Amino acid sequence: MNPDAVDELLAGADRDDANARVPHGSSDDPRILDFSANTNPRYPDGVTRVYSSALPAAQSYPADDYSEYRIAAGEYVGCEPHAVVPTPGGLAAMRLAIGTCVRPGESVLVPYPSFGEYDREVRLQGGEPTPVAHDDLLDADPGDHAMAVVCNPNNPTGDAADPDELRSFAARCRDADTVLLVDEAFLGFTDQPSLAGTDGVVVARSLTKLFGLPGLRMGFAVATGRLHDRLAAARRTWNLSVPAMAVGEHCMTCEAFVDETCARVARERARMAERLAARFDVHDSDAPFLLLDAGSTEDATQAIDDARTHDIAIRDARTFRGLDSHVRVAVRLPDENDRLLAALGV
């Protein structure tokens, strides 16, 4: 990480935000029904047992090759286990990729509106984010850029990239010697194939969204060849805890849980979108959330206040670049979704 870039980030930060953090959803208030974060409200059976069983082994350092975890991850996304680099969550995989591929002063294509951490991570390395509208990014010229970032499906809009167009863009990036970083945090909610194992591509995967365990910090990166070697060499030693490793291995084998989750999310997402259309312009989504255009910044504020009055948190999406009248809501369990719809008067 570039120290000068950290100082520049702090110098440009608002005085009330001395840590220069990116706004995120989620609430730690147990009284609040949280629709602002996009995590599964359920996690697989057996997690408690697996976690408890792993605790005695946590008294020793884990074997740093994480071989069983890499095997499970390889089977989960369809790549060779050797290509997997374990990380404590998807964001750690992104930092590892950007930190090993972007030098100070180099440009990185980043989508907008999209996950704000891309810009921040690039700036922390001294790089320069070059914003491109997310639905135009696959048509952009990757030449003269050290990296291009794609969020698939995109957050906060929820739309997934066309697989053929994404592979074509990956090929153009490879020809231009530009690393393609694909954030697949929500890809597990779709039936699309992963780009894991594609030459010239770093895939960042999070296990915390689909498996409902964001506080456990489980994830991995996938890359091949020299790109993989750089990630593996830069990875922190023992960067995944023993309980996280054990739970991650377990979750990645829970095919029935994934199938049930995806079916429920698709069913509830369609039902919610139909109801919410009475008040909002609802963006098409392949993800476990919906982006809603309230029509004006005042109407967006009113929607947030309406939800809060009913002890419900929704995401103020006006913090995303390019959005000024939007909110985002997660797709949760049917009875919880009914509470949200009632609170928003639809």
Image (tube, grey):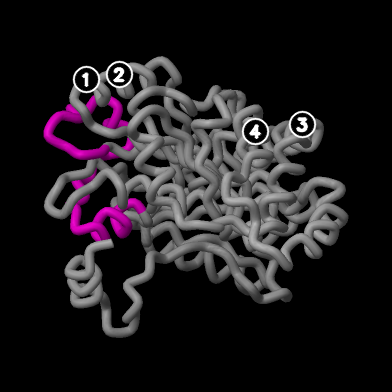
The secondary structure type at the circle numbered 1 is helix
Task: Give the number of the mark in front: 4 or 2.
Answer: 4
Report x, y in % for residue 289: 57, 46
Report x, y in % for residue 336: 75, 55
Q: Quadrant of the N terminus?
A: bottom left
Q: Which mark is residue 171?
A: 2
From the viewer's perspective, is residue 45 above or below residue 163? below
Q: CA distance from mark 1 to mark 3?
A: 36 Å
Q: Disc 4, disc 1: CB below 8 Å? A: no
Q: Disc 1, disc 2: CB below 8 Å? A: yes
Residue range (magenta): 118-147
Residue of label 1? 175
Q: CA distance from mark 3 to mark 2?
A: 31 Å
Residue of label 3? 255
Report x, y in % for residue 168: 33, 17
Of the image marks 1 and 3, the number of the one nearer the N terminus: 1
Residue of label 4? 71
Task: Residue type at mark 4: give it.
Answer: Ile
Q: CA distance from mark 1 to mark 2?
A: 6 Å
Task: Residue type at mark 1: give it.
Answer: Asp
Of the image marks 3 and 4, the number of the one nearer the N terminus: 4
Report x, y in % for residue 138: 30, 27
Q: CA distance from mark 4 to mark 2?
A: 27 Å
* Residue at x 19%, y 53% (from the top left corner): 127
Residue 298: image quadrant is bottom left
Local crowd size for mark 1, using a 10 Å CA cut-off: few (<14), some (14–19), many (≥20): few
